[in-house]
Image: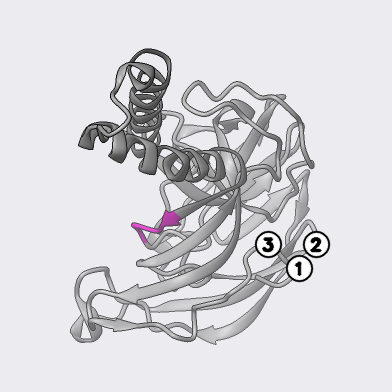
Amino acid sequence: MDFTLGLFLAVVLTGLVWLLDIVFFRARRAPDTKESVVVEYARSFFPVLLVVFLIRAFLFEPFQVPSGSMIPTIRVGDFLLVNKFAYGLRLPLIHTELTHGGPVQAGDIMVFRYPKNPRIDYIKRVIGLPGDTIEVKGNDLYINGKLVPQKYIGPFAYRPEGQGDRGMVIPTKEYAQTIGGHTFHIIEFDTPEAHMDFGPYKVPPNCYFMMGDDRDNSNDSRFWGCVPRANIVGKAMFVWFSWDSENWSIRWNQIGRALDGPHN
């Protein structure tokens, strides 16, 4: 069951039990009779569950990164805080937009519901806005016909997920790239057969073109199209915890990393 739905049902159930007790049963109890355990727990948990639900639905929501498509910016096992109101408030569960909020900007890191399966949340970087034309030629990214420059940083020690420090290192290069005022790092395999051409593709209205920072190992808009505005969950803010499950250790250098600034 979806966590938000489960939390909503818990709020409704505890609130209903407490309300029924207030309306129908409290006045009928003898002064020296205690309320039932069910009512006591409902009265205690309802306000807590309600506050948690409202915070997750309208303000902030934690998000765990399950894959490496955003390496080197975000690592597998990172726990992020997502701003739910940055792009406008939405009703939970039915996702109806209530307010528009701030504009989506190229370079933002966005959490969204995967268009092919809205029950799954994805996280990628916004590359193209509505009306933009996106094209990829090998390792070169073009937005509206202009090459996006990238600065070579150096080799990157890339290992397949699940193999730890003993895994085979894939020849990979790290670059710095700037899009929409955001400067960030990407990685690309140093093997021509890993590169692919895409486009040109014009982003439709109310839609966004998304790509992972791990350019050659990301299931993104190049494969399944753009993300409709209705699928937006929120804007990634920062890493509040990071766990390296392969080495069974905390990545202290990732904790506190900002994801919504000019350098991320």
The secondary structure making up most of the magenta span is loop
What residue sits right under mark 1 in the picture? Answer: 262
Mark sitting on residue 260: 3
Q: Secondary structure at mark 1?
A: loop
Q: Is residue 117 left or right of residue 92?
A: left
Q: Residue at x 33, y 30 (%)?
A: 31
Residue type, numbered disc 1 = Pro
Does the stretch in magenta take in 183?
Answer: no
Determine which residue is flagged by label 2. 181
Occupied quadrant, residue 6: top left
Q: Mark 2 and 3 residues: CB-CB less than 8 Å, in contact?
A: no
Question: Vertically, is 64 above or below 247?
Answer: above
Q: Which residues are magenta?
A: 63-67
Towards the viewer: 98 or 111: 98
| Residue toward you, 193 or 79 | 79
The front one of 172 and 40 is 40
Q: Quadrant location of the N terminus?
A: top left
- N-terminal of the pair, mark 2 or mark 3, is 2
Element at label 3: loop
Q: Earlier in the sequence, mark 2 or mark 1?
A: 2
